Amino acid sequence: MIQKEFFIRFGSTVLLLPLVFFFILQGGNLFNFFLIICLIISIYEWNKITNNNYLFFAGAIFLFFSFYSAQIIRNDSNIFSLFNFFFLITICISTDIGGYVFGKVFKGPKLTKISPKKTYSGVFGSYFFSLLSTYILFKNQNYFFDNFFHFKDIHLFLVIAISSISQLGDLFISYFKRLTNIKDTGKIIPGHGGLLDRIDGMIFVFPLSLIFNLFP
């Protein structure tokens, strides 16, 4: 069962990532169109896991600000905007993957009742994968970006900070899913669940990164 779940999860990731990267690389109006579609789906899924009108509207406003932040970061006139965006999503994605892999392989004590699947080994895996993937991004950036960044000590702090925000965002959405007794926010992504299940960390990372300027 676990093996089947992994292959479904892996397969959908392989199919979707090139499409997502296409919109990110294009930027501009194409990226804006992609964000609007994701925002509509996210608000729909948020509505499913909230039984309170106040919470729904507050969450919808926050989601709008989050996607708006993502748009500003990617479409900024700064020559480093594309790298900054990839820097953030690399940490978020690897945080998610590291938590999943280490949690499944090493298991161990549960982190919190809010999300029963979260373990301390998963937290370690999230930090480990995010640091490793960011280091790989910096080492190979010359193949994809015109402007070069050097990996410095401050980046270790930034990676840990952004990964922590991403993990807290995951727990936040898990809390509301648990309140409404819903396993996934949707079924739009086979093996993953809903869109919010996959971007729950990013929706917090984007606005906070913009506000506090957490970029290389």
Image (cartoon, helix red, strand yellow):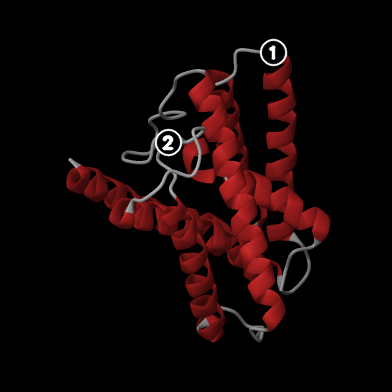
Quadrant holding the C terminus? bottom right
**Residue drawn 69% across the image and 28% down it:** 59
**Residue drawn 56% across the image and 39% down it:** 171
- Mark 2, other Cα within 10 Å: few <14 / some 14–19 / many ≥20: few
Residue located beneath label 2 in the image:
116
Given contact means CB atoms under 8 Å apart, are the residues at marks 2 and 1 in contact?
no
Nearer the observer: mark 2 or 1; the answer is 2
Residue located beneath label 1 in the image:
53
When the figure is inspected, residue 159 is found, relative to residue 34, above or below; the finding is below
Q: Which mark is residue 1?
A: none
Secondary element under disc 2, as helix, strand or loop, is loop
Viewer can see residue 125? yes
Give left or right: position of 6 versus 79: left
Tag 1: residue type? Answer: Asn
- Please state the horizontal and vertical placement of residue 9, each as a whole percent of the image: 30, 47
Tag 2: residue type? Answer: Pro
Quadrant holding the N terminus? top left
What is the distance, in whole Å, between disc 2 and disc 1 at their CAs?
Answer: 27 Å
- Please state the horizontal and vertical placement of residue 188, each as a whole percent of the image: 40, 33
Q: Which label's residue is closer to the chain start, 2 or 1? A: 1
